[in-house]
Amino acid sequence: MKGVALSLITALLGSSALYAQSHLPPRNSSGVSSGLTASSSSTEARDCATLAKDFPANDQTKSKLAKLRNRWKDIQAKYAEASKRLGRKIDPARVNDVVARRFINPPDWEAYLQTHPVVNPKEVYSPRPTVWENWLRTAQGPVKTLAQSNDSVALPHLLDWNQDAQMGVYGSPEVGVLKNHDNYGRNILKRDALNLSEIGSLESLGLHFEPLICQEDLPALIKADLSRPECAEVYKNSEPLATDDPTKTIARLVVRKGIDATQVSPDKMAKRWYWFACWPRAALPKNDTERACGMFKYPSVKDVPSRISVILAEAKTFQSCENSADIDSFGYILDAQRRMVALHPFNKGNGRVSRWFMDVLAEKTGLPALIGVNMNTDVSTPMGDYTHEIQTATEKSLETLSTCLTRYESENFEGLQSSRCGMVDDLSGGGP
């Protein structure tokens, strides 16, 4: 956080910033936490030869990719044949359980399924059904159109998807544009604490992790730390300062802290100032049996245009490589999605846009939609584990599609619509 934000931290917290510095863990000369390996962000798009070197497709990889593509192709053909026999379209790209896992975080979806015998994905997230229908309309419309064209993903596509998916959910200044303020990731609860390998995954994507005392332990520590009254004051005031309404947040800053409203970015920054300046630091885990809470800052606003250009230029190169058989397309596509979400180029909806980016690349290479396990851990899961999770979940989704096809050929169509095998609405204008 620089410029105005940094001056505001000082104005808000005074000497508490020194408290933060005194509790920082040791850093090596590259600025990365001790015990972690630095990975610089690429400033140039890789060419085909480099992609083949970084994502080599050996015989085993080629065999797995061929099986995955052939199985997906076979399922599509069987659904088309069944549609003719049944006299109505049943589309593998519209099956409830598979589509839901593309947008709804799988743990949330599983929890919903356990308590709702009647399955309706549009009821999971609020505001209902706006969030679901916006996502579905965007996925079935412009995302699908681009995936089936010869065009490459370009920045205007991403901006349009970001705006379309959040229409009526967030205000227009927040969506459809590259981010205008820095954003952060947090793992401050014990249930979300990270081990050394997970922190290393973040750092490999250029995300600096700052280990912090877990939130559950914070109140007692603050109360006990009577020698630092400024921290107790900040802790007491930071929570009520942050609201869901940026205007109210600014108003409270003006009244409570005497800050000039014209100098305040319309964002919920009160808690974040506190995190940086006064939240007690913790030590990094020594190994993967230990875990640490903490937070990390995504790349700054000024770095986004150049870095997103590199990601998109590289994706365009990937699509045109004559040596594509020598490239592990599955591995490259996952890497591209992780780099996109690690960049966090938008104010809102970064995960969704990164997955659409992944969907387009997957469809253009003949792969099915790639299914995740937990959308909140895509950047903290080590790449090897992430690849295994996505592969396993994707293969499971193909099994679900096969099971649903069997049910459609033996059970009543209408009766299946409230089950996992039901068909989500077609909002693309393509008919029932």
Image: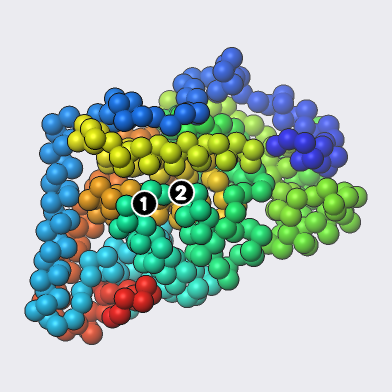
Which residue position holds label 2?
154
Left or right: 286 in relation to 244: left
105 shown above or below 337: below
Left or right: 244 in relation to 263: left
- Quadrant containing the C terminus in the rendered view: bottom left
Of all residues, the one furthest to the top in this rendering is 29
> Tag 2: residue type?
Ala
Which of the pair 96/14 is nearer the observer?
A: 96
Which residue position holds label 1?
151
Q: Secondary structure at mark 2?
A: loop
Q: Position of residue 311 (x, y in %)?
A: 45, 39
**Alpha carbon of mark 2 to alpha carbon of mark 1: how far?**
9 Å
Determine contact: label 2, label 1, CB under 8 Å.
yes
Image point (26%, 69%), residue name: 95
Which of the pair 374/113 is nearer the observer?
A: 374
> Tag 1: residue type?
Asp
Give the colour scheme of this rendering: rainbow
Image point (32%, 56%), residue name: 149
Q: Secondary structure at mark 1?
A: loop
